[in-house]
Image (spheres, rainbow, N blue to C red):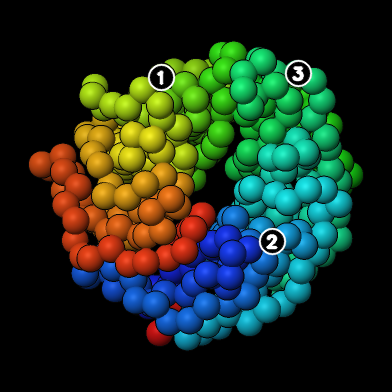
Amino acid sequence: MASEGKYMAYVGSYSYNGKAKGITVYDVDVEKGTFKERCEVEVDNSSYVTASNDNRTLYSVADEGVVAFRILENGSLSRLNSAKTKGMRACHLSMDKEDRYVFVSGFHDGKATVLRLRKDGGVGEIVDGVFHKGLGSVAERNFRPHVTCCRRTPDNKFVMIVDSGLDQVKIYRFSEKDEHLVQVDTIPCEMESAPRNLRFSSDGKFFYLMYEQKNVIDVFTYETGDRVPNVEKIQTISTMGEKHSSLAAACSLRFSPDEKHMFCSNAGDESVAVYSRDEKTGLLTMLCCLPISGEYPKDISVFPDDRHLAVINHESNSITFFKIDYEKKLLIMSSNAIKCNEPNSCIIVKVDD
């Protein structure tokens, strides 16, 4: 069973007001679908956390750049090092499948940065970086570049960089040989749609692009190519139910561990949408979109049993927990909410028993 073993959750929070240290470490009770706080670790304003693919290293955005921690066998954290990105503070991190590089997204300066990862999991030197240029739609906040997500494609040939300010996904060629980002294509998006997050299926055949302002998910097929990849949009589906708030922002997009379901949180609407996913066609079907008993669900984390959900509520300073009933299309609160000051991001990691 996928959920057997010991799991930890790491939640990144802003620390500037002195009410949080940066990262809160939780023991995960998979059966009950809840977290139990163990300790806090100091990081200046941890706006995003993620883990290496081998689950041995935790990475966090911080004021000084990117911070790396060794994940110990008991789930505790031991600081490895930090590295600067030569840019303003970031909003998103991702690794390639082999944990060779970390790709850093800069919202404020429109910069994407690639740093090498050391063999021990620490963050190494900057390999390359690009500043996006140009003007987006003249909306209140979307008139200049805002890089919100960078991901290396599963074929390791390209890097997709999502820019919510320019309403584009720029595609760059990138290889270990020259370690240089060279733009080869662009996926134009609707004006003022604000693409925010992109996720690939693990088989590399599909990717899912979530739009913050348009409140939809676009489903694309992906085929590799020599010069440019071949991508085709096959579906657009709403992130919200029929009755919803007029002011809403899609925030977080996550697969279930088995990738048979997908989840999207909506701030303003204060809801989470649950989708079933056809693994052969890649298409999504909405099962439900329900309230999450919190404000500004900035991130969501699916438990390893595929049956429980943690919602990271930034404005209400809370984490709420739900049991997912796929058959009845319901989210049922599974335990009491816990307090967490200005949480931004959460990752659940399997550690050794």
Which label is found at residue 135? 3
- Report the quarter where the C terminus lies: bottom left
Residue linked to disc 2: 62
Helix, strand or loop status at disc 3: loop
Q: Residues within 10 Å of mark 2 (few under 14, many from 20)?
A: many
Q: Identify the amino acid type marked 1.
A: Gln
Place of residue 121 in the rendered image (x, y in percent of width and height, measured from the top left): 70, 70
Label number found at residue 298: none
- Discs 3, 1 touching: Cβ within 8 Å: no
Q: Which of marks 1 and 3 precedes in the sequence?
A: 3
Q: Is residue 215 visible?
A: yes
Task: Give me the C-alpha separation between circle 3 and circle 1.
Answer: 27 Å
Question: For the residue carrying disc 3, how many other residues have a C-alpha within 10 Å: few (<14), some (14-19), or many (20+)?
Answer: few
For label 1, the residue is 235
User: Label 2 to label 1, Cα distance in Å?
Assistant: 36 Å
Q: Is residue 297 above or below residue 7?
A: above
Which callout, 2 or 3, points at the residue further toward the start of the chain?
2
* Label 1: element kind: strand
Q: Residue at x 76, y 32 (%)?
A: 172
| Residue 281: % across, % down | 37, 27
**Residue type of the residue flagged with mark 3:** Leu
